[in-house]
Image (tube, helix red, strand yellow):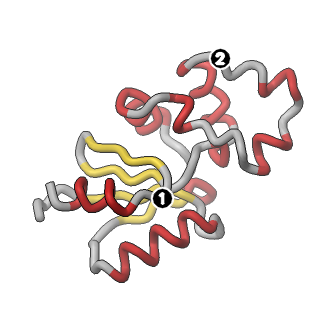
Amino acid sequence: MSSTPITLYGIPNCSSVKKAREWMSQHQVAHHFHDFKKQGLDAQDLSHWLSKVDWTALLNRKGTTWRGLDAVTQAQATDAASAQQLMLQWPSLVKRPVLVKGQRVVVGVNPEAWLSVIHE
C-alpha cells in the first residue's frame, strides 16, 4: 500500500457513509474523514472530483435535499458547471461517500473500487 493519504468525504449520519466508514475500519484502512456539515465543501476539491467523475454520477438526485428543491432550481442542473454551483450551495447534493486518494476519485458505496484505489 502506498503512503498517499486517503480521504473519505461525507456526512456522518448518512447510511452510505456509515457503511463506508465501517468497511474502512473492518479493513484497517487509515483514512481521514471530511464532514461536509462541519467542514464544508471546498470548490477546488469539487472541481477535482468533477474532472474525474461525470457530474451526473456526483449529483445526488435521489436524496431528500434534491427532493426539497423547487423544480426551477432542479432544472438549473444542466451541465458540470451548473451542477457544481448547486453542490457548492447545498453540499448534501453530493452523492456520498466520496473516496479520494491522489488523483483517484470513487463515488458511492463500491468496495471493489475502494480496494483497487487503496492498493495502488
Quadrant, the C terminus: bottom left
Rendering quarter of residue 7: bottom left
Tell me the distance, in whole angstroms, between the alpha carbons under discs 2 and 1. 25 Å
Q: Secondary structure at mark 1?
A: loop
Q: What residue sits right under mark 2 in the picture? A: 78
Asked if residue 21 is positioned above or below residue 66 in the image, the reply reads below
Q: Position of residue 107 (x, y in %)?
A: 45, 47
70 lies left or right of 42:
right
Rendering quarter of residue 29: bottom left
Q: Position of residue 119 (x, y in %)?
A: 17, 60
Quadrant, the N terminus: bottom left
Asked if residue 19 is positioned above or below residue 65 in the image, the reply reads below
- Give the residue displayed 35% in from the left and 44% down from the top: 105
Asked if residue 9 is positioned above or below residue 52 in the image, the reply reads below
Residue type (three-letter) at the residue carrying disc 1: Val
Q: Position of residue 79 (x, y in %)?
A: 58, 17
Q: Secondary structure at mark 2?
A: loop
Query: Residue 76 versus residue 41: which sits nearer the camera?
Result: 76
Query: Residue 14 versus residue 61: which sits nearer the camera?
Result: 61
Which numbered disc flags the more N-terminal residue, 2 or 1?
A: 2
Nearest to the eye among marks 2 and 1: give it.
1
Q: What residue sits right under mark 1 in the picture? A: 109
Instruction: Point out the residue furthest to the right here.
Output: 70
Q: Residues within 10 Å of mark 1 (few under 14, many from 20)?
A: some
117 lies left or right of 73:
left
- Give the residue displayed 85% in from the left and 43% down from the top: 68
Rendering quarter of residue 114: bottom left
Residue type (three-letter) at the residue carrying disc 2: Thr
- Give the residue displayed 54% in from the left and 65% down from the top: 17
- Give the residue displayed 25% in from the left and 40% down from the top: 103
**Label pair 2/1, CB-CB below 8 angstroms:** no
